[in-house]
Image (cartoon, rainbow, N blue to C red):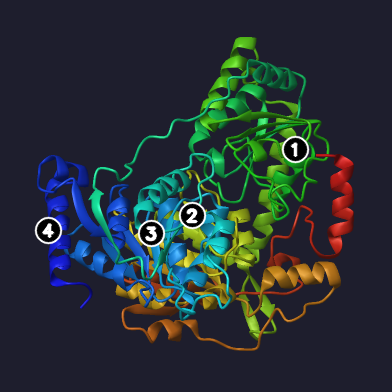
């Protein structure tokens, strides 16, 4: 039994008082709780996070988190929190990331000391790269330094895990229990950062977790407070932007993850200035795909029309994006642009390019302000039904539609690995996307060839129909992310699009999805290789090397071996795949569709590449062009 009976009963009374009164503050104000109570650091952490509306914990307990586990046990029994135990810490990190990304719910990942924390830290790369604030709680080595703790980093140096986690995000070692209030304030500012949020790591030394904070002030815990948006007030920068727009005729707006709440303003701006819009891979639907000015995704794995709009622009307006290598072709996408107007809340990202006017602050507010300046100046190019620039891009988008249609018209190709005709990845993904959209299922794309084909193919009409971790391209993210739909307050049906390699990185969802009552679907596109890297090897060096395998896996049988899951063979024709999708969708639990897909030299088997990238033996030419352009 953890702790004394007195400690347990006191915790239970506090938990019940908070549950009855609705919050810690009201429980104190009503007199049900004293303002000053003796409680452990572990309970203070749980109370502090509860005060920030964090009620969901995901992870695995170990010897480094037994005390926190007992507090969560009591608070869960009282109906205040919920602990979701899973089978891998990386999976837990992905679930928390998806929960924040899709539903806006802040949760906490909890693991023990050592390997578990390492796994969770690795998984937090996805939330860090996509600007998503989540909490991580790791057990840490004891502060008395009585000797090496089992599973700590084997080095005679202090706070080694603090060094590791501080590289990924903000961290705090709770070496002093009374520091919990500062740690919680730092955490709040990190996970709710309106610019680019990130994970926050509580490091909990094992011997400090049960330490009692005498007369802990229950009204000292930080609460959720609104964070004001910062708006640019530099009139000169808006006026310069208007002049640049007036003197440009081939304008492209490129949007990233920071533009999520500004879809109507982006469309209004595009109409006003006669611009076309190119999306980043993780923001499909902010501007509906069918909008005449939407040229779809651009970048080194972009579309024919998206890259044309980037390459041929004379003025670029970047909205809420970082200059990630694939996003702007390692700095070579803007081949003819002279200036860039850059909207971002982060000064580093806003000033990433030379010849740029940085409009720093809240993106939606600054867009509204720029539109106001433009309308005041009398500019309104949207009155015209068309222009040479818009018509050029519309023709390019028609070319792209024809390019895709050729691949849809020939959906199967003979593959010697399978010894028969099988579906191509573009055809199979298109069929599955159409099915998902028709049935209002949210799509999650995993890393690799499935991901790149996916963001070239999706045709979302609203943001939130698709989630793709292009920030870190974490193999195994999509299946793990599905569990967020079982944990969320109002979960929806989700479909994970995943390759065979990515699925075997994180297959724990088969068990955890069943355990937690998940109703969802996983589609495994099996080409028995790492197609994204194999294609790159062939393009650069003429042959593949160690990116395929000879192991045959019956993924449907694997799923069927787990009671509560259902495995289905997806077939090798469009008709068979559609039938399998319907069967999987009707199943009341987690279904897995196994689809063999083609990989090979036939150009109709893939979607190709339309942009450069600073990788492999392309580096010298790409770098030379980048410095020649000068952005």
Q: Is residue 481 visible?
A: no
How far across and down, in percent of the image, does residue 434 sit? 49, 57
Image quadrant holding the N terminus, namely: bottom left
Label 1 vs 4, first from the N-terminus: 4
Separation of marks 3 and 4 at Cα, in angstroms:
24 Å
Q: Which residue is mark 3?
A: 108
Towards the viewer: 421 or 116: 116
- 618 vs 186: above or below: below
- Binning the other alpha carbons within 10 Å of mark 2 as few (below 14), some (14 to 19) or many (20 upward) gives many
Task: Count neighbours of disc 1 (C-alpha within 10 A) and say few if under 14, some if 14 to 19, many if 20 or more.
Answer: some
Residue 369 appears anywhere in the view: yes
Pointer 1 residue: 353
- The foreground one among 557 and 13 is 13
Left-right relation of 65 to 479: left
Circle 3: element type: strand
- Spatial distance from mark 4 to mark 2, Cα to Cα? 32 Å
Quarter holding the C terminus is top right
Residue shown at the point (17%, 46%) measured from the top left: 22
Q: Which mark is residue 38?
A: none
- 179 vs 277: above or below: below
**SS under mark 2:** loop
Identify which residue is drawn at 71% across, 22% down.
245
Q: Nearer the viewer, residue 164 or 274?
A: 164
Q: CA distance from mark 3 to mark 1?
A: 36 Å
The tag on residue 199 is 2
**Disc 1, SS:** loop
Sequence-first tag of 1 and 2: 2
Q: Which residue is mark 4?
A: 13
Q: Is residue 4 left or right of residue 303?
A: left
């Amino acid at each position: 039994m953890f702790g004394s009976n007195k400690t347990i009963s006191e915790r239970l009374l506090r938990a019940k008082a908070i549950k009855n009164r609705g919050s810690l503050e009201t429980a104190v104000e009503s007199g049900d709780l004293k303002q000053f109570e003796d409680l452990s650091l572990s309970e203070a952490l749980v109370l502090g996070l509860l005060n920030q509306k964090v009620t969901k914990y995901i992870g695995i307990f170990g010897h480094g988190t037994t005390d926190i586990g007992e507090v969560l046990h009591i608070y869960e029994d009282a109906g205040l929190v919920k602990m979701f135990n899973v089978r891998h810490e990386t999976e837990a990190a992905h679930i928390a990331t998806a929960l924040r990304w899709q539903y806006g719910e802040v949760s906490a990942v909890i693991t023990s000391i050592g390997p578990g924390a390492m796994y969770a830290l690795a998984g937090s790369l996805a939330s860090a790269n996509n600007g998503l604030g989540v909490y991580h709680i790791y057990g840490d080595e004891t502060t008395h330094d009585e000797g090496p703790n089992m599973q700590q980093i084997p080095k005679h140096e202090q706070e080694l895990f603090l060094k590791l986690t501080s590289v990924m995000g903000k961290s705090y070692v709770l070496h002093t229990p009374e520091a919990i209030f500062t740690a919680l304030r730092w955490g709040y500012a990190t996970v709710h950062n309106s610019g680019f949020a990130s994970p926050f790591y509580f490091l909990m030394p094992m011997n400090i977790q049960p330490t009692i904070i005498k007369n802990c002030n229950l009204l000292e815990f930080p609460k959720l407070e609104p964070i004001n948006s910062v708006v640019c007030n530099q009139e000169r920068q808006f006026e310069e932007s208007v002049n640049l727009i007036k003197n440009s005729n081939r304008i492209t707006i490129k949007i990233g993850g920071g533009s999520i709440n500004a879809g109507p303003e982006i469309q209004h701006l595009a109409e006003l200035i006669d611009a076309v819009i190119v999306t980043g891979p993780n923001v499909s639907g902010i501007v509906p795909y069918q909008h005449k000015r939407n040229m779809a995704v651009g970048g080194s794995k972009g579309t024919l029309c998206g890259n044309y709009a980037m390459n041929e622009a004379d003025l670029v307006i970047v909205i809420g994006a970082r200059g990630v290598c694939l996003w702007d072709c390692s700095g070579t996408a803007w081949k003819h642009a002279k200036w860039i107007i850059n909207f971002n809340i982060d000064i580093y990202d806003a000033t990433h390019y030379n010849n740029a006017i940085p409009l720093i602050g809240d993106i939606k507010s600054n867009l509204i302000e720029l539109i106001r300046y433009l309308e005041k100046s009398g500019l309104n190019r949207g009155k015209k039904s068309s222009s040479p620039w818009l018509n050029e891009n519309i023709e390019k988008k028609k070319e792209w539609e024809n390019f895709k249609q050729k691949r849809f018209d020939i959906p199967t190709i003979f593959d010697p690995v399978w010894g028969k005709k099988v579906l191509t990845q573009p055809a199979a993904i298109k069929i599955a996307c159409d099915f998902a959209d028709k049935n209002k299922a949210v799509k999650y794309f995993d890393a690799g060839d499935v991901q790149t084909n996916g963001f070239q193919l999706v045709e979302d009409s609203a943001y939130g129909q698709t989630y793709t971790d292009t920030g870190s391209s974490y193999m195994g993210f999509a299946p793990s992310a599905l569990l967020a739909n079982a944990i969320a307050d109002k979960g929806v049906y989700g479909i994970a699009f995943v390759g065979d390699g990515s699925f075997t990185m994180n297959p724990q969802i088969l068990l955890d999805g069943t355990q937690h009552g998940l109703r969802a679907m996983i589609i495994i596109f099996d080409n028995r290789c790492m197609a994204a890297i194999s294609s790159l090897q062939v393009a650069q060096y003429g042959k593949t090397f160690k990116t395929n395998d000879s192991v045959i896996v019956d993924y449907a049988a694997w799923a069927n071996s787990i009671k509560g899951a259902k495995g289905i063979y997806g077939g090798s024709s469009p008709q068979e795949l559609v039938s399998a999708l319907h069967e999987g969708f009707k199943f009341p639990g987690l279904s897995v569709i196994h689809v063999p897909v083609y990989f090979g030299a036939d150009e109709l088997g893939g979607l190709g590449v339309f942009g450069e990238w600073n990788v492999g033996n392309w580096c010298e030419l790409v770098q030379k062009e980048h410095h020649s352009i000068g952005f």
